Amino acid sequence: MEKNDDITLSLIVRLIRQHRRLIIPLLLLVAVGAVEVVRLLPRRYHSECILFPVEQSYVAASMKLMGTSLGVNVGEFTRDHDAFYPVFYPEFVYDARMQNSLLRTVVRPGNKGHGMTYAQYLRRHRTPLAPADTDALRPSAVTDSLVKAMNKKLKLMVDTKTYVITIEVVDADAFVASEVCRAARQYLYDFIADYRKKKVAGQAAYYRKIEGQHRQNYETSWAAYCRYADTHTNPSQPGVEQRTQQLLVQAQNNRALMEAVKMQRINAEARVSDTTPPFITIQQPAVAPRKEGVDRLLFVVGVVFLAFTLMLLGFLYKPIVRQLK
């Protein structure tokens, strides 16, 4: 190494040894300060709710598997499909209707006071750039800052094997996290229940229409059979008996189709008034402190490393300037 010209590892080690009495106390001071900053940070809480969909063909296998493992016969499941398959449920957090509903949810930070909307809470705590108007939320007032802040706090997850649904909300206030988690569960519950009610109501109307068509076909074919049988009373005439049997079979087939559609219509109308809940709540929204020990440790280590790097660059300033010359 040429004297005072090259920056090498040996030069760095020598500078650290030379200034160790300054570096060590400063790093300890920085570490203590970082720890104090971490201690002053508000503790975050997460509220978690676990749900399981009820009476759907896509969960029959997983439900039977769970029942078999517990030695319970869960029976048969209705074979009905929803267009909103459970794996698509996480997309609900990006739906404007759900976002509006959650932002209108009344929360009470610290379980005190008369409460405020979740949008007002987010404006006060996390979104200083949001509009100042905190009156009743209008669709035009749903800003990107509010939506992004809410999406960072809210997660909706679905296990693709068991279809268990997990709703998680993270916030610095335990009561707010719990209330938003309950509101998200209620919105999902109401949405799926309303969707299924409208679906079966549409099915009932469709089957009533089809039943009327099959009833008309049956009555027409039965009338044709009766007219032919009344006007052709001599079975010895060529083709009379064969034609009579054809008309009778056609009328019987139309009646069987009418009865089958009638049963479908009765089943659909019965399901319109069905009060079976869309989900079983396996775990009610429970609040617990969020485990952030690793994140906070990494923060302290990062601050100490940054301080050490800045001190080292300060010690190397003169050799760097000298080398550039």
Image: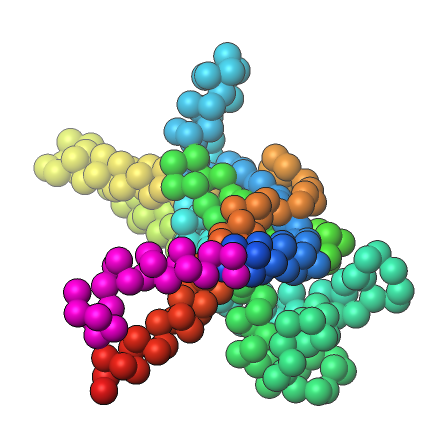
Q: Nearer the viewer, residue 207 or 181?
A: 181
> Is 241 part of what is drawn in magenta?
no
- Tell me the residue at 45%/61% (across/down): 19
Q: Which color scheme did the rendering employ for the protein?
A: rainbow
In terms of depth relative to the viewer, which is nearer, 281 or 47? 47
| Residue 129 x/y as whole percent | 61, 84
Q: Identify the residue at horizontal 16%, vertical 35% (top origin).
A: 242
Q: Which residue is rendered at x = 39% and y = 41% of the image? A: 160
Say whether residue 92 is visible: no
Tell me what residue is drawn at x 29 percent, y 62 percent: 11
Eyeballing the image, is 198 above or below 143?
A: above
Could you say where residue 116 lies in the image, as x and y percent from the top left? Answer: 79, 70
Is residue 6 depicted above or below 304 in this figure? below
Residue 47 position (above or below residue 72) = below
**In the image, farthest residue toward the right:** 113
The picture quadrant where one finds residue 25 is bottom right
Residue 280: x and y, percent? 60, 37
Q: Can residue 32 be seen in this view?
A: yes
- Kindly indicate the quadrant of the structure image that contains residue 271: top right
Location of the C terminus by quadrant is bottom left
Q: List the single residue furthest toward the left.
A: 238
Q: How many labels does the image show?
A: 0
Question: Residue 12 magenta-drawn?
Answer: yes
Q: Nearer the viewer, residue 297 or 255?
A: 297
Outermost residue to the top: 71
Q: Where the N terminus falls, by quadrant?
A: bottom left
Magenta-highlighted residues: 1-22
